Image (tube, rainbow, N blue to C red):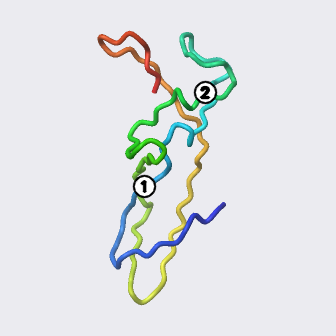
Amino acid sequence: MKILGNVSVPVGTYTGGKLTIAGNPGDVLLTVAADPEPGFAGTPARPFPPIRSQIQGARGTAGNKTVSVGVTFDSPLTVTTSQNNALDLEFEPRPPAFIVGHVPPGAGMTPWR
């Protein structure tokens, strides 16, 4: 576990927040499954070329893109002026992503997402 940072939060009660993460193609490493579906343009069990990936929802300019991920707390966090509060937000950044291919009407290729 690594502490990413500390921030000051205004007094109030919070039920969630937004986590902002890097959203440039090279910021995410995708590995092709050992047995990809027919038609998937990737080498089995090898990293997928970052230049060929696009992260949905990324905002900003090339090289400085980010994605906001909504987080809902299990129970509300109440911040008061009389005490310090701590929020331990843990997440696993390495679960498998599912990439699905589809052909939109009028498209000449299959985008995978």
Kind of residue at disc 1: Val
Give SS at disc 1: strand
Locate the C terminus by quadrant.
Answer: top left
In the picture, measured across the screen, residue 14 lies left or right of residue 24, that is left
Foreground: 4 or 87? 4
Q: Earlier in the sequence, mark 1 or mark 2?
A: 2
Give SS at disc 2: loop
In the picture, measured across the screen, residue 31 lies left or right of residue 82, that is right
**Residue indicated by mark 1:** 71
Residue drawn at the location 59% of the way across and 41% of the way down? 95
- In the rendered view, tell whether residue 34 sits above or below residue 60: above
- In the rendered view, tell whether residue 49 sits above or below residue 73: above
Locate the N terminus by quadrant.
Answer: bottom right
Task: Specify the label residue 48 is tagged with.
Answer: 2
Residue drawn at the location 38% of the way across and 9% of the way down? 108
Residue drawn at the location 46% of the way across and 32% of the way down? 54
Residue 73 in the image: state x and y as whole percent.
43, 61
